[in-house]
Image (cartoon, rainbow, N blue to C red):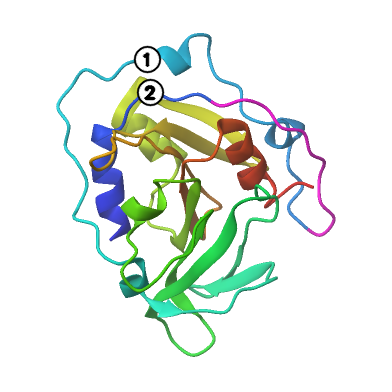
Amino acid sequence: MMRSRIKLLTALLALGLAGAGCTAQAGAPDPDQAGCEGFTLPPGFADLVYDGPTFGRPPFRPIVTFGTSLDLSGARFVRVAGADALLPQDLPADVTLRVALGGDEGALGTGYEVVQLFYGDSAVDESTTFEDLIRGRAIRFVVHRAEGDDAATVKSTIKDRAALVRIGPHDGAVVHSDPIGALRVRTWDVYWSDGRLDYSVESTVEPDELARLTQSLYCQ
């Protein structure tokens, strides 16, 4: 499933993010300072326009069909593929965790192979799709076993349509997606890996909020 996400990156567009400050968190990996100070992009990066074909995305289905419901309220970690996956801490005030789902359950003690968290400023029911959720302010946070879906792969796939940033001690790649759905919404997406787990975020929050959200995993 995640491999198809990288293939779809050939359809993604320009990008741009602003800064957010933070400091290293005790007990977390020791990030370099650049990984806690927001995202810096080359001049004019946000003005790039995609002029190639639109590959689109797979049909949307109800969010609740993506996996088994999980209770992660207040959690700092979730077990994924035998490793403790960090969860976002610095979220926009108006965006709430609506659904947490685990998919492809692994062996005893290893947790799920993939976990998806959906945050939004509106309620989610059994018929809500991600396309519905991104009509407002929304975030989809995904973590799964490392499969090479890292910043280097994204950058090599879509070249200057991706910007390399630092997320704590890790390299990340930021992308401004193709328009989604009838409303033609474009999400701000970011991809990175810690070597054991691959992380990705799709969002309609402001770029500086996305920087704070992702870097909050390693900084405070």
Q: Quadrant of the N terminus?
A: bottom left
Q: Amino acid at mark 2?
A: Ala
Q: Residue furthest bottom?
A: 108
The kind of residue tagged 1 is Leu
Q: Quadrant of residue 15?
A: top left
Asked if residue 70 is among those painted magenta in the image, a careful observer would answer no
Q: Main secondary structure of the magenta part?
A: loop
Tell me the residue at 56%/27% (across/down): 17
Q: Which residues are magenta?
A: 17-27
Q: Is residue 23 above or below residue 65?
A: above
> What label does residue 165 carry, if any?
none
Name above or below for residue 180 compared with residue 176: below
Percent of width and height locating residue 31 = 73, 42
Q: Horizontal and vertical percent for residue 195?
A: 52, 54
Residue denoted by label 2: 14
Residue 200, given in percent of the width and then of the height, sits at 46, 50
Tell me, for residue 48, which label it has, or none: 1
* Mark 2 crowd level (few <14, some 14–19, many ≥20, 10 Å Cα): many
In terms of secondary structure, where does tag 1 sit?
loop
